[in-house]
Image: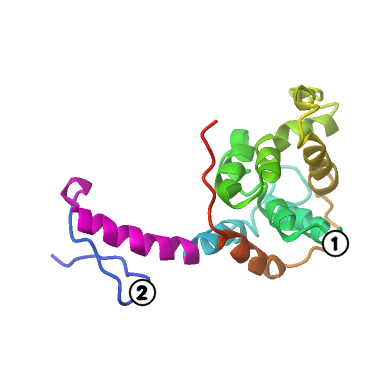
């Protein structure tokens, strides 16, 4: 039977030729850990960008633009507002899980970006959907006052500003967005940061 091995990313890397994790030796794990650090550093940003790019031609369920264009529009608004690079990348990726995890897309983005961004942006990502409810007073099933439980928190104003300026208005089919290529180097730099360890909630 012919082996169907996936290619290694680098020619000088080594496979761990075992069929179950229980068989891995300490040396096997050390090999994987060393190669994994390089792999993540080079591949994580590319895979995230590919997730977003793959949705470019998706249909929409009623918004006049799809989620890909919403994300680009959000990032372009932040860019043209002079926001720093982290805020721009957060704007680009805040809804990257909107379709895959519709009921928890804020937590999805926070988990994806959390160890690379400030506490301010991590907090905002987790809660931005609740802050958006304040802009939907006629929505039949959301509570426009939901965000009020966090009023007084140090990051409340940023979350409110983000949603007001870069989220709830980023649905204009006539807005001329910057292309994804504008943001790709920023995403690569963000994921090249040394990851922080965040405590479990």
At horizontal 86% and vertical 58% (from top left) the residue drawn is: 81
Range of residues picked out in magenta: 20-42
Q: Residue 36 in magenta?
A: yes
> Residue beneath label 1, please?
80
Q: Position of residue 55 (x, y in %)?
A: 61, 56
Give the side of residue 145 with respect to residue 189, left or right. Answer: right
At horizontal 16% and vertical 67% (from top left) the residue drawn is: 2
At horizontal 69% and vertical 45% (from top left) the residue drawn is: 121
Q: Residues within 10 Å of mark 2 (few under 14, many from 20)?
A: few
Q: Position of residue 103 (x, y in %)?
A: 61, 33
Can residue 99 be seen from the camera position used here? Answer: no
- Is 116 placed above or below 49 here? above
Q: Are marks 2 and 1 in contact (CB under 8 Å)?
A: no
- Is 136 placed above or below 59 here? above
Q: Residue 179 in magenta?
A: no
Task: Identify the residue at the far left of this view.
Answer: 1
Q: Position of residue 33 (x, y in %)?
A: 34, 58
If you read the primary sequence from the N terminus, does the residue marked by circle 2 or circle 1 appear first? 2
Give the side of residue 20 with respect to residue 125, left or right. Answer: left
Dot label at residue 70: none
Residue in front for this viewpoint, 9 or 103: 9
Secondary structure mostly taken by the magenta-highlighted segment of the chain? helix
- Is 12 placed above or below 191 here? below
Can residue 23 be seen from the camera position used here? Answer: yes
Q: Position of residue 9 (x, y in %)?
A: 37, 70
- Give the quadrant of residue 82: bottom right
> Residue beneath label 2, please?
10
Q: Residues within 10 Å of mark 1 (few under 14, many from 20)?
A: few
- Give the quadrant of residue 86: bottom right
Q: Which quadrant of the figure contains the C terminus?
A: top right
At horizontal 69% and vertical 65% (from top left) the residue drawn is: 183
Mark 1: secondary structure: helix
């Amino acid at each position: 039977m012919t082996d169907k091995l996936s290619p290694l990313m680098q020619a000088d890397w080594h496979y761990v030729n075992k069929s179950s994790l229980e068989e891995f030796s300490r040396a096997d794990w050390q090999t994987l850990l060393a190669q994994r650090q390089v792999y993540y550093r080079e591949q994580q940003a590319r895979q995230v960008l590919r997730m977003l790019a793959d949705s470019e031609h998706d249909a929409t369920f009623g918004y006049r633009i799809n989620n890909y264009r919403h994300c680009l529009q959000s990032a372009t608004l932040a860019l043209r507002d002079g926001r720093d690079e982290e805020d721009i990348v957060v704007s680009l990726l805040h809804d990257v899980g909107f379709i895959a995890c519709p009921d928890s897309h804020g937590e999805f983005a926070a988990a994806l970006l959390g160890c690379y961004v400030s506490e301010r942006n991590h907090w905002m990502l987790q809660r931005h959907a609740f802050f958006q409810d304040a802009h939907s007073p006629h929505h039949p099933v959301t509570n426009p006052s939901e965000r009020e439980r966090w009023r007084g928190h140090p990051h409340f104003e940023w979350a409110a500003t983000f949603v007001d300026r870069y989220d709830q208005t980023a649905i204009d089919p006539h807005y001329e967005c910057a292309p994804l290529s504008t943001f790709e180097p920023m995403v690569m730099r963000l994921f090249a940061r040394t990851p922080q360890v965040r405590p479990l909630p």
